[in-house]
Amino acid sequence: KGTNEISASYAALDIEGSAYFKGEGTLILNGGEVGFINPTNFSEKKVIIESGTYIINSEDVGVQSNSATWSQTGGKIEINCKGDAVVGRDIRFTGGKFTANGSLVATSKIAISHANLTVKSEKAALISERTIAINGARIESAGKAVEEYNGENEINIVALSRERTTSMLFGKNVGIFADYLVLILAALIV
């Protein structure tokens, strides 16, 4: 809740293991070398940003998560760094808004699905030793549509709307078919 700020000469936030971030507040991380680091050696660990606002300022790397999967499912993240914005094994975006002035670098994969990203770098914006997958989004570079990411250093990824599969009337635990049944019953009654 509210606005919280952490400053340190090396890493503003150092968490080994799994971590889930959510809330309506703002967390500002000012790292001398790294804004956020997860030095765990276990690939089954996860760091998930679910909601809230995160501003990460660093003299080098914004986020470093060498083994744990690093994901953003919601919220807003802004990274201001002099090195790479995110360095990790597996980097995933499935929602929210992400802005950075450094590259996203993965040793395994970068997966972007229905998320909004703006990345500007002196080198390629997205770098992966194995896979870069972009689904449910439109890619732009220098204000022009890009059919396929080809190492552009400035990209804007805009989420496309998801196809609705859950009920608007009864909630996410009920399929959309229930809404159609109510609509049909209402039409028959009229």
Image: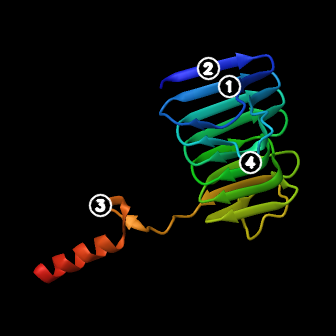
Instruction: Please say if 109 is above or below 88.
Output: below
**As shown in the figure, which amino acid type bears the numbered disc 4?**
Val
Q: In front: mark 4 or mark 3?
A: 3
**As shown in the figure, which amino acid type bears the numbered disc 2?**
Glu
Residue at 62% across, 58% down: 158
Residue bearing mark 2? 5
Mark 1, secondary structure of its residue? strand
Residue at 69% across, 31% down: 56
Q: In the image, which disc is placed on residue 119?
A: 4
Mark 4, secondary structure of its residue? strand
Q: Residue furthest left?
A: 190
Residue at 83% across, 25% down: 33
**As shown in the figure, which amino acid type bears the numbered disc 1?**
Leu
Q: Can you give x and y, in whole percent of width and height, for residue 120 in the image?
A: 77, 46
Residue bearing mark 1? 29
Mark yes or no: residue 142 visible.
no
Gap between marks 4 and 1, in whole Å?
A: 19 Å
- Quick one: 102 or 142, which is closer to the camera? 102
Q: Mark 4 or mark 1, which has the lower sequence index?
A: 1
Gap between marks 4 and 2, in whole Å?
A: 24 Å
Q: Residues within 10 Å of mark 3 (few under 14, many from 20)?
A: few
**As shown in the figure, which amino acid type bears the numbered disc 3?**
Phe
Q: In the image, which disc is placed on residue 170?
A: 3
| Side (left or right) of 86 relative to 118 | right
Q: Residues within 10 Å of mark 4 (few under 14, many from 20)?
A: many
Q: Are marks 4 and 3 in contact (CB under 8 Å)?
A: no
Q: Mark 2 or mark 3, which has the lower sequence index?
A: 2
How is the rendered protein coloured?
Answer: rainbow
